[in-house]
Image (cartoon, grey):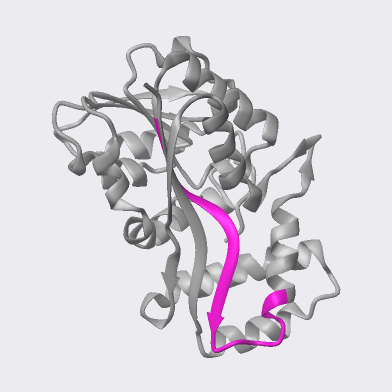
Amino acid sequence: MPDEVKPDDAVTGEFSPDWLTLREPADAVARAADLVGEVPRPVKVVRDLGCGTGSLGRWLAPQLPAPQHWIMTDRDPALLRLAADGMPSEVAVSTHLRDVTELTAEDLAGTDLVTCSALLDLLTAGEIDRLVAVLAESRVHALFTLSVTGEVTLTPEDPLDRAVQDAFNAHQRREIDGRRLLGPDAPAYAAAAFEKAGARVLTRPSPWRLGPALSDLTAEWLRGWAGAAHEERPDLAVDAYLTRRTATLPTASVGHQDLLAIFK
């Protein structure tokens, strides 16, 4: 599904529990597990930004030593409840109803690591600059996973693949209520911002690997990907394209990037 700005009050669309549950196995496989070993210890307090249903926490918590306290942060109270209920029982969990773009250094007092998943591409340049500045002020490390990079490779190819990809990426860079989203430019922008702030930055590709073996997720992703492209370019023959693509599902590599920023 296309990434959209998270709604304030409803759990719908791209951030519905059903969609987040459907994508969780692919997210877990895609994330760069080797970066976890590079995270400076100790890691006792983790704040997860835009936590959704807690997928990242369920993946990361078992890879970190105990004890752990996770602060699940989201602007959606329903998702916060699901995230808190779904974390491993041996992990202490609290929730913070907060827009992640309003995070302050005071919020990060006592925090060892800030995490997020599939979030950076939903932010503006200014919002990333502010988030990096808060982390730099607090000297808190960051592990940001699954930021969309815009590259999609489908096999077998279809003549409309490239046009759909370009239109989707343009859609991700659209302006909403005066906010110009970075979309697929976000990973590189964030890496540069962290380096400018004095962090050591490590990045890894973390593509989704989709196809007939993940038929429900692949079909749903195709519909969302093409649907966003059609919003950007109504002239694209998306209905016929989706009919072809969902009749015989292709294999797909969907580009993402993971980033670890370490402050001395």
Residue 161 in magenta?
yes
Part of the protein shown in magenta: 142-162
The image quadrant of residue 92 is top left
Residue 160 in magenta?
yes
Depth check, front residue: 161 or 8 = 161
Q: Quadrant of the C terminus?
A: top left
- Residue that appears at 49% across and 14% down: 137
Residue 147 spot, x, y in % from top left: 52, 49
31 vs 180: above or below: below
Q: Is residue 144 left or right of residue 88?
A: right
Depth check, front residue: 141 or 72 = 141
Q: Is residue 31 left or right of residue 5?
A: left
Q: Is residue 246 left or right of residue 139?
A: right
Helix, strand or loop for the magenta stretch, by majority: strand
- Residue that appears at 29% across and 35% down: 39
Residue 34 spot, x, y in % from top left: 28, 50
8 vs 198: above or below: below
Q: Quadrant of the N terminus?
A: bottom right
- Residue that appears at 13% across and 30% down: 66
Residue 99 shows up from this direction: no
Residue 242 shows up from this direction: yes
Residue 138 spot, x, y in % from top left: 44, 15
Residue 162 spot, x, y in % from top left: 70, 76
Depth check, front residue: 223 or 49 = 49
